[in-house]
């Protein structure tokens, strides 16, 4: 596996692969890999000949009081995990190569970014859209794979790709969960034992919403209120949002139907912000 640090080196390496006819796939990540990341790499490998992973904790998508410094990192462990996968190259740029002095360009997806995570993280998606555009330009992948756990991010990237005619096919990979239902996230590493229990309020909140939907409840406000009560019954939880949204437009709905998705963001002990989402119409026991 090639470990590449400079955008120009990636460019050249990918060009050589392409000359030999390879279809290229990119899995953008911020590292500290778990099975969720590995599932995205394996999904990419089903669609392309050559999988490239990028590993970059992108500073511009973190707000001033967010967890950039506490974001878990372990380069050696990540490389060991990557070597066991069908990954041909990893791009690990230093921030100063991605954002050299004088950098002043931003990509903004205007409407989809206002709701949900965008409400409390106002510059987050501009940071994501900009770095993903840069990664697409550096790697020039045919296919790019993103996780559905960051459902709004996936929608924003799909919108950006369509709006800017970027020649990349975007594929979403399903959420991967721990045995107890917790959606896998690098940030789970920052949960201690008692906070780990509180973190389960998200996935069990999703199960509760599905049970209510299954029993015939269609009033989005009633389902949302029940999920809020459930989450707040756990210690250390503070809700960022509990929203019932349409899966395509991401707009809030009043009456739930088979395309309605519950989207959640919850702070655990004020330190770790977790997100989760899922369709209400899936049976409660399904993940
Ligand atoms: O989902 C992530 O890990 C990041 O937001 C991404 C897409 C790698 C951009 O920094």
Image (tube, rainbow, N blue to C red):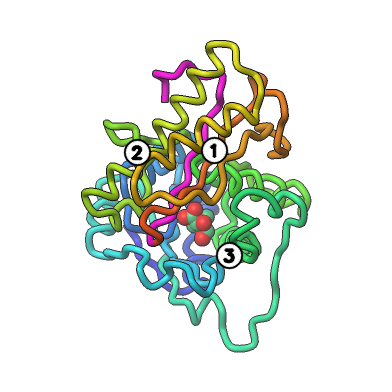
Q: Residue at x 29, y 50 (%)?
A: 195
Dot 3 or dot 1: first in sequence order is 3
Q: Residue 17, position in %: x, y? A: 48, 54
Disc 3 marks which residue? Answer: 131
Mark 1 residue element: strand
Crowding at mark 3 (Cα within 10 Å: few <14, some 14-19, many 20+): many
Task: Say which quadrant the C terminus sits in.
Answer: top left
As drawn, 221 above or below 194: above
The answer to whether residue 284 is magenta is: yes
- Residue range corresponding to the magenta coloring: 271-287
Q: Nearer the viewer, residue 42 or 236?
A: 236
Q: Residue 30, position in %: x, y? A: 42, 60
Q: Residue 234, position in %: x, y? A: 36, 42
Q: What is the quadrant of residue 256 in the picture? A: top right
Disc 1 marks which residue? Answer: 172
Mark 2 residue element: helix
* Label drawn at residue 200: 2
Q: What is the distance, in whole Å, between disc 1 and disc 2 at their CAs?
A: 24 Å
Q: Residue at x 52, y 46 (%)?
A: 150
Q: Is residue 114 left or right of residue 117?
A: right
Dot 3 or dot 2: first in sequence order is 3
Could one spot residue 17 in this view of the protein?
no
Q: Is residue 257 left or right of residue 5?
A: right
């Amino acid at each position: 596996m090639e470990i590449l640090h400079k955008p120009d080196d990636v460019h050249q390496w990918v060009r050589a692969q392409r000359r030999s006819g390879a279809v290229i796939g990119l899995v953008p990540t911020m590292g500290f890999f778990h099975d969720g990341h590995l599932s995205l790499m394996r999904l990419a490998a089903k669609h392309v000949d050559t999988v490239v992973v990028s590993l970059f904790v992108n500073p511009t998508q973190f707000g001033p009081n967010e967890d950039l410094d506490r974001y878990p990192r372990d380069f050696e462990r990540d490389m060991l995990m990557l070597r066991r996968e069908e990954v041909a190259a990893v791009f690990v740029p230093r921030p100063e190569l991605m954002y050299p002095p004088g950098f002043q360009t931003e990509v903004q997806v205007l409407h989809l970014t206002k709701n949900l995570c965008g409400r409390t993280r106002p510059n987050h998606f501009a940071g994501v859209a900009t770095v993903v555009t840069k990664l697409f330009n550096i790697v020039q992948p045919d296919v790019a794979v993103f996780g559905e756990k960051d459902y709004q991010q996936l929608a924003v990237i799909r919108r950006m790709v369509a709006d800017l005619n970027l020649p990349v096919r975007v594929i979403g990979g399903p959420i991967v969960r721990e045995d107890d239902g917790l959606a896998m996230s690098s940030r789970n590493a920052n949960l201690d034992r008692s906070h780990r229990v509180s973190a389960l309020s998200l996935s069990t909140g999703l199960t509760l919403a599905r049970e209510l939907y299954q029993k015939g409840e269609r009033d989005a406000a009633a389902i949302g209120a029940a999920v809020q009560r459930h989450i707040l019954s756990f210690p250390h939880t503070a809700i960022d949002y509990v929203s019932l949204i349409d899966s395509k437009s991401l707009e809030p709905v009043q009456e739930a139907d088979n395309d309605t998705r519950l989207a959640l963001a919850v702070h655990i002990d004020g330190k770790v912000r977790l997100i989760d989402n899922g369709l209400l119409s899936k049976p409660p026991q399904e993940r």
